[in-house]
Image (tube, rainbow, N blue to C red):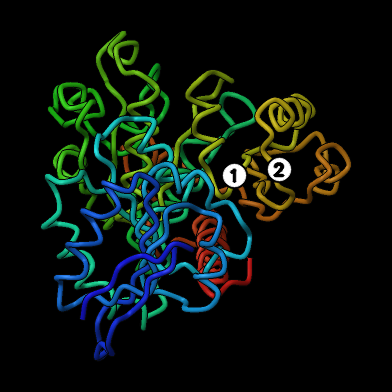
Amino acid sequence: MVARPRSDGWTTALDERPRGRRTRVILAIHDMGFHQEVLDQLERDSQVDVLAALSGPERLVGAVVESEPDVTVVCPTVARGMRHPTLIGRSGRTVLVAQEMTVPILREAIDAGALAVFAWPEERKELAIFLSGTKASRVEGSSGRGRVIAVFGARGGAGTTFVATHLAAALADCGRRSVLVDLDASFADVTVALGVGANERVRTVADLLPVVDELEPGHLDDALFKHPRGFSVLFAPAEENAGERVPPGLYSASVALLAGGFDEVVLHIPRRIDDLARIGVGMADEVVLVVTLDLFSLYGARRSMTALQMNEPIGRCRVLVNRLGRADVAPGDVRRVLGVPAAVIVRFDPKIPRVQARGALLSPKARRAGRDLRSLARLVVRRQLATVDGGV
């Protein structure tokens, strides 16, 4: 079968193609020369069925609604137009192809919910392999990309690092592929919390600086620390002032690529409102705001919510109350001050300081605080599954 785009942007099939278990693809690339190159390869692939070939985002909604593809292959120009609510959950897995690979393009990829990014023509074989393996995963109801969860503390000592590390572990305990990214380049608290010694050499985000202009999933995989509890970690630089050399764009590009390979990406947000905090919260599908039951924490949380627009859109922010001992205010005051009720209350547990002093995590079966954090993980998983089903 030979197919070519019609003047209205749709593909006309000149004869019937057998469908079988081939991957159903919509192609949307603005530049016609680039468009034709990718279309020619897709049509030669016996594992791919091109449902429509478009030159822009204008007709993409109609094509997706009518055909419900397994994969939508787009260029960066079209990706910018993929904000239409009708496309959420219906465009299958979104894949971005680009003739040059830059940090802004990777940012476009995560904004469009892209599962993968391929450089053209260098990675055309990898694109073909990805497409041939996608049809089976659609039957399983896989989402387009992993969910990004930002964990932000209303003040120092609120327990941000404790919550972020245990959330990543609890998600892994639930059978989810989770990765923890430490965006706090000044303190690198995650490194200490996970028991990595000062003299122990582990790779960090700083090791990605030589490949910042050509970052690929393989580079990130080499930089990740594999924790025994089953989750991965991208550490912040541990050396003094090393974080100043890491551009914020490297973090955003890393998160974008990690979201393509993991079910959940947990971001440990810096305790101050800076560029990295804005990037992390801005990229997050969900924000966990960690507060303690004192007025300084609650009013600091309110300022942070406003400055970082944490609850836009409404429902994006969950408030987690971390009980550290006797409280000045009651949990009910959280809604009064923040306008958002507490979603999870982590009970005080005297074991926690001893566990933290060893650079260890609570047991997967720990009670009290451990049970509360597992409840948070289940809430995250339920929202992710609801998103896959088109609910949230």
Q: Position of residue 114 (x, y in %)?
A: 39, 53
Nearer to us in this view, 382 or 28: 28
Q: Position of residue 144 (x, y in %)?
A: 41, 62
In this view, 299 is above or below 370: above
Q: Which residue is at a point 15% across and 46% down the rendered structure image? A: 121
Quadrant including the C terminus: bottom right
Q: Circles 1 and 2: CB distance less than 8 Å?
A: yes
Q: Position of residue 63 (x, y in %)?
A: 50, 70
Label 2 element class? loop
Asked if residue 225 shows in the view, the reply is: no
Left or right for 119, reference 301: left
Which residue is the site of mark 1?
Answer: 287
Q: Which residue is at a point 27% across and 20% down the rendered structure image? A: 238
Left or right for 106, reference 17: right
Q: Position of residue 283 (x, y in %)?
A: 51, 39
In this view, 11 is above or below 198: below
Asked if residue 247 shows in the view, the reply is: yes
Rendered image: mark on residue 221: none
Q: In which quadrant of the rendered view does residue 330 lie?
A: top right
Label 1 element class? strand
Quadrant including the N terminus: bottom left
Q: Which residue is at a point 50% across and 30% down the rendered structure image? A: 279
Q: In which quadrant of the rendered view does residue 207 lie?
A: top left
Left or right for 376, reference 15: right
Q: Amino acid at mark 1?
A: Val
Q: Dot 2 surroundings within 10 Å: few (below 14), some, or many (20 or more)?
A: some
The earlier-in-sequence mark between 1 and 2 is 1
Q: Amino acid at mark 2?
A: Asn
Which residue is the site of mark 2?
Answer: 311
Q: Dot 1 surroundings within 10 Å: few (below 14), some, or many (20 or more)?
A: many
Q: Which residue is at a point 21% across and 53% down the rendered structure image? A: 37
Q: In which quadrant of the rendered view does residue 47 lie?
A: bottom left
